[in-house]
Image: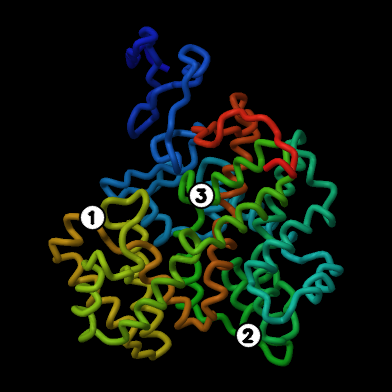
Amino acid sequence: MTDKTMAMTSSEGNWDYPLIPGSVGPEVVDIRKFYGQTGMFTYDPGFTSTASCQSAITYIDGEKGILLHRGYPIDQLAENSTFMEVSYLLVHGELPKAKELDQFTYTISRHTMLHEQLSTFYRGFRRDAHPMAIMCGVVGALSAFYHDSTDITDPEQRMIATHRLIAKMPTIAAMAYKYSVGQPFMYPDNSVSYTGNFLRMTFGVPAEAYEVNPVIERAMRRIFILHADHEQNASTSTVRLAGSSGANPFACIAAGIACLWGPAHGGANEAALNMLREIARPENIPEYIARAKDKDDPFRLMGFGHRVYKNYDPRAKVMQQTAEEVLKELGISDPVLDTARELEQIALKDDYFIEKKLYPNVDFYSGVILNAIGFPTEMFTALFALARTVGWVAQWNEMISDPEQKIGRPRQLYVGATQRDYVEVGER
C-alpha cells in the first residue's frame, strides 16, 4: 500500500481512502472502512468496478487484449506448454523444472481413476441427462468418497484435493459422455498424456485399441490451456464465495460448474456455433449483420465482444489457427468455418463493430473445433469445466491462504416496503 489516497466529500464530512497499486494494471481504492466511516454502501451491480480479492494468478488488460498467467502470455503457453505445465504454473506459481514436472505429472496420473461405486452413481441419472447436470452431481459427491482431503485447514489435504480434482475431471467428463451414448466406461491409461487420455476415454471402446491423433491432441491441449483460468469471472467468483464459508473443495468446484453452466458464461461457444449454423453460408452474412445492427431485431451475433476484452481476445487468434489445422487434418470442408472466417473479416472492418469494440472472442472458433472433432454440443460446456478446474482450484487455494480472506457477504440497496404491522387474514 502507498501513501496515495483518494478524497471523498459529502454533506456529512470529508474522508480519505488509500489507493492500493497492483504489480500491473489500475490502482484500486480501499473502501473497507467506507461503511463504518460514512454509514453508506457503494452500489455496483455485477461487481464490474469492484475488486473482491488480491490475486497473483491471472492478469487481463481488456483494452489491450492481454492475458497473462503468472506473467506468461497466453499465446506463448498455448503454443509451447503442455496442460500439465500450465496446471503446475497456476497452482504453484512458477513453471516447473523437468523433475518437478515429472513428479507432478506422475502424481496426477495416479489420481485419474474414480471410486468404483461412482459408476453406479452415474446409472442413477437418466440417459438423456445433460453432461453438466451429471458433472455437478458427481463432483459434489466426491466429498462423500474422499474424506481424507476435505479438511481445508490442512495444507496437505488441500493439495491432495487439488490433485484429485485436476486428475479426475477428464474421467468424470468422459464417463458423462459415454453414459449418454450407451457405451461402456473406459478406464484411464496412465501411459498416455493428460489430453490424449481424455480423448481415449471419450472416443475409445474396449473392443479395439485407440490411437490418439497428434493434431487433435494438440488442438485439445490448446483448448484446455486457453480455458484454464480467466481471473475473477462468474464461476471463479462462485468458487471463491463458496470457499469463503469453509465449504469443502469438491462442493466449491461443483458450485463453479453450476455457475459455468449458464448460457451467458460457459455455454457461449455452443450459442456461437448455433448462430454460424443458422447463417449457414457466407453469402447470407450481410443479412445477419443488418439484423444485428437493428435494435428492434432480437438477433445477436454470438462470439463477438466480451465482458472484459475491448480488443481482440488473444485466445481467439490461437483458436482460429487451431480450427484451420483440425479441419485440414480431418479433411473436412465445413461451410460453418467458411462462414466464420468471412464473418470475422467483415466484422473487423465494419464501423459498427469497430465503434462498439466487438471483436471475436474465444467462443467464436472453439465450437467449430469441438464439433469437427466429434463432440456433441451438450459436451462443450463440460469440456470448459474440465479445463477450468485447474484455475478454480488454484484460485481456491490462494483464497484459503489469504490472511485477509473473510466470508463473502455483499450488501444491497433495499427498495422494498418499509416496516408495517401484520394484519390478520380476515382483515386484509
- Mark 2 vs mark 1: in front: 1
Say how many tags the image has: 3
Q: Which residue is mark 3?
A: 234
Measured Cα–Cα span from mark 2 to mark 1: 44 Å
Mark 2 vs 1, N-terminal side: 2
Do residues under tags 2 and 1 come within 8 Å of each other at their CB atoms?
no
**Disc 2 or 3, which lies upstream in sequence?**
2
Please give the residue where the numbered disc 2 appears in the rendered image.
Answer: 210
In the structure shown, which secondary structural element does the residue marked by tag 2 occupy?
Answer: loop
- Kind of residue indicated by mark 3: Ala
Image marks 2 and 3: residues in contact by CB distance under 8 Å: no
* SS at mark 3 in the image: helix
Find the distance from the CA under tag 2 to the CA under tag 3: 37 Å
Q: Quadrant of residue 268?
A: bottom left
Which of the pair 125/297 is nearer the observer? 297
Which amino acid, by three-letter code, is at mark 1?
A: Lys
Tag 1 residue: 357
**Residue 220: percent from the left, percent from the top?**
50, 70
